[in-house]
Image: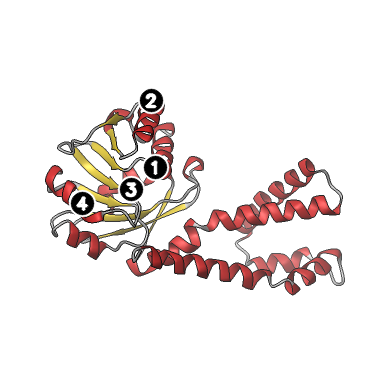
Amino acid sequence: MNKIHFIGAGQMVEAIIRAGINNGKLQAENITIEDIDPTRITRLTEKYAVTASTSLSNARLVVIAVRPQDNLTAVAKSILDRAPAEAIVISIIAGVTLAHLDTLLGGRHPIARIIPNTLTDTGYGFSGVVLNERVKATDIQDFVESFGKVLYLDERQLDIFTGFAIAGPNYIYYFIESLTDAGVLAGLPRSQATAVVLENLVGAVEMLKRSQLHPRQLLDINNSPAGVGMHGLYELNNSDFAAGLQRSVLAAVKRTTQLANE
């Protein structure tokens, strides 16, 4: 009962497997996969030496990694028909609640919902986890920590977490691209502008961690009266940047709540 079985072998599953194997926390011989797309099976079995299988008899963890609009009733029935009753079912499907999963699975399985962060290869980024009453955090800890950091949440927070934290790298990438373009617009070569932006980003985060100051406090320290920085911030304030970013997060959260109903 040491196997991890993935129903679905898409990009997120590949990222989880890759991260777990590369950092030594998952072993390929303990991973089995299935998918309706044979090319995905071929890719993962050849690249990561995992096993293609439809047997769940030895599965300790069964990870549902299909799309919200797929036939979840059929997936749940296949788990009921094939998996041991004590197998922990882990769903990485956005928007599908524990209660709905429990109904589909006949109220007999331990169930966890995990929304994985896309920063799996780096060891950074939080994945959000909620559990039903039949599973404890220690039961899945080794698995969820194999591809990054973990936040255990109330389920009512999970859609918010998805639109904010899981979509979070998108906002950072967009900011980096825009700030780099600004450096190029001002006259720096792109290679130099990119290097400056990345160094400033990493350094600013480290300053926040080390100083434990609020960002506004560091802004105050960083800027002198009528100085260069204050003039730049004045224009940024006029750009609706903060409100635009907040609207983006709210739109992502709203989309998360819609997925389960499609």
In this picture, is 229 found above or below 9?
below
SS for dot 2: helix
- CA separation, marks 2 and 1? 15 Å
Badge nearest the viewer, 4 or 2: 4
Q: Is residue 84 visible?
A: no
Task: Pinpoint residue 168: horizontal percent, then vertical percent.
Answer: 53, 57
Looking at the rendered image, the quarter that the N terminus falls into is: top left
Q: Is residue 170 visible?
A: yes
**Upstream in the sequence, badge 3 or badge 2?**
2
Residue kind at label 3, given as amino acid type? Ala
Residue nearest the viewer, comparing 176 with 135: 176
Badge nearest the viewer, 3 or 4: 4
Residue kind at label 1, given as amino acid type? Gly
What residue is at 64 percent from the left and 55 percent from the top? Answer: 174
Badge nearest the viewer, 1 or 4: 4
Q: Which residue is mark 2?
A: 46
Task: Pinpoint residue 179: horizontal percent, then vertical percent.
Answer: 73, 55
**Upstream in the sequence, badge 2 or badge 1?**
1
Q: Which residue is mark 4?
A: 74
**Upstream in the sequence, badge 1 or badge 3?**
1
Residue kind at label 2, given as amino acid type? Glu
Q: Which residue is mark 1?
A: 10
- CA separation, marks 3 and 4? 13 Å
In this picture, is 114 found above or below 30?
below
Task: Pinpoint residue 143: horizontal percent, then vertical percent.
Answer: 33, 43
- CA separation, marks 1 and 3? 8 Å
- CA separation, marks 1 and 4? 18 Å
Characterize the local packing of mark 3: few (<14), some (14-19) or many (20 or more) Cα atoms within 10 angstroms.
many
Determine which quarter of the picture holds residue 242: bottom right
Q: Looking at the image, do the residues carrying marks 1 and 3 touch, with CB atoms under 8 Å apart? A: yes
- CA separation, marks 4 and 2? 28 Å
